[in-house]
Image: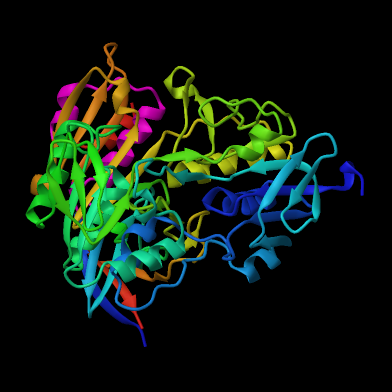
Amino acid sequence: MTMADAGMVIIGAGKAGARAVVGLREHGWPGEITLIGDEVFPPYDRPPLSKAQIVEAGEPQPILLLDEPTMASLKATWRGGVAATAIDREAHEVALADGSRVPYRKLLIATGARPRRLTIAGAERVMLLRDFPDTLALRRAFTGSARIAVIGGGFIGLELASSAAKLGCRVAVIEAQPRILLRGVPEEIAGVVAARHREAGVEIITGAKIAEIAADSVILADGRRIAADILIAGIGAAPATELGEAAGLAMDNGIACDDHMRTSDPDIYAAGDCCSFPHPVFGGRRLRMEAWRSAQDQAAVATANMAGGDRRFEAVPWFWSDQYDLNLQISGLPDEGRRAVRRPLKDGAFILCHIRDDGTLVGASGVGRGNLIARDVKLLELLIGKKARPDEASLADSEFQLRTLLKG
Amino acid sequence: MTQWVVACAAGDIDIEDVRRFDHGGRTFAIYRAPDGAYHATDGLCTHEQVHLADGLVMDTIIECPMHNGRFDYRSGAAKGSPVCVDLKTYPVKVEDGRVLIGLE
């Protein structure tokens, strides 16, 4: 087979990989599609792994994003349970762990990210969460009155702390920084989340440096000893770039893409947690997103371009977290703002509107019970995408309908 | 046989907006399109059982507040990832300033 006959190949069967299969067909690609995933499951949804699937009563099943019949109906070939081991750019082929080679016309790398590990002695006892089997292992660990130490007060750690507390475990969160959610979440919102954890009986220890992991506890640098039967680390993730690096693709905090999600090789694209790209709404600032919606949006753009289109990635970043009855959502880039206008909503919910010196709305971050903040965060996201400079008194007025601003 | 149930007053929903209506242990979403016509669908997103009435109506599309699943609320048609299962729709009529939906 020559390269001209070869199909589209996707490495990585997460959210981006699944979206890419659908995207290639939506954009009219008529030829072969091969999806390669190193997990045995077809693409499944990861957000429930730290939440619903930890606490639900019955044995959970992966929530498939694309099951095998759907892939068959899309005429996509599923190569599950086999890792890609190399990209041969010269030959336009992907080598797999089973010795086979898959030729590609265009290639999408959607290999995601891997959780960072602690590097101190005893770290091998520390559990991590990335995939469905990790969730099954955590379910078995979160029994009865188990004492759980969660290392890292980011989203994964806090969602797991919330799930463990719901199951009746005794939970401590150990965070190295002066507060939880330091990266990307404003202090006022992190404060609401921390208070909710404390209300649920979770101990939050900040500014804590870990000296040692002992058999039954975590020992901090100041000598404090946190008793723990189970240890979990949620200390960030590193982009899975080995294949791209070995193939000589340009790197910049992940696989470096342009605003069309194209790598330094014009026949290779990337999407999701593994890559970075310049964002046109924020002056070309290079971002690497570890977010569910961003993964699917990037895959949609990459596949449009793989199929011969000319589309720029310009979706405004958005992500959410659910802890207890609280829903937190962030859109845009709050750290681009110089001041925040507080928009109070019902039942203690609120949204901070992050604004640049020139009045441009660049971010919105909110927290509240249930779906209280969802609609306004969405409207603010649309305004951020338009680089709007909304009237700040209107933003602060909870009676004011944000929708009005979009029509101006 | 269709049973007509009063969901709300016609003036309760603005143009291009949505409202939740619970009846008989079920939940529905009632919409008013830009042309003023009323529509009704099941109240929960087909993706993760979230109340659509907390979402945003844009033209004839309802967007789920949780994961941005989109549906055309006139037909119930899913408009792309992450949802692929259509919403069930119900007939609607307006009588004496009240919005009624037709249930089987």
Residue at left offset 48%, top offset 56%: B82
Quarter of the image where one finds residue A387:
top left
Residue B97, percent across and down? 21, 62
Q: Quick check: can you spot residue A60?
A: yes
Residue A26, percent across and down? 65, 50
Q: Toward the viewer: A251 or B97?
A: A251
Q: Quick check: can you spot residue B44?
A: no
Q: Toward the viewer: A226 or A122?
A: A122
Assess whether residue A382 is covered by the magenta stretch: yes
Location of residue A395 with respect to A229 vertically, above or below: above
Residue at left offset 39%, top offset 63%: A135
Q: Which residues are drawn in magenta? A: A368-397
The reply, left or right, for residue A77 in relation to residue A43 is right
In this view, which residue lies farthest toward the right?
A1
Location of residue A202 with respect to A288 vertically, above or below: below
Q: Toward the viewer: A251 or A259?
A: A251
In this view, which residue lies farthest toward the top?
A358
Assess whether residue A398 is covered by the magenta stretch: no
Q: Toward the viewer: A121 or A348?
A: A121
How is the model colour-coded? rainbow
Residue B31, percent across and down? 32, 57
The reply, left or right, for residue A358 in relation to residue A252 is left
The reply, left or right, for residue B57 in relation to residue A14 is left
How many numbered circles does the render carry? Answer: 0
The reply, left or right, for residue B42 in relation to residue A212 is right
Residue at left offset 28%, top offset 20%: A337
Quadrant for the C terminus of chain A in the image? top left
Residue A242, percent across and down? 61, 38
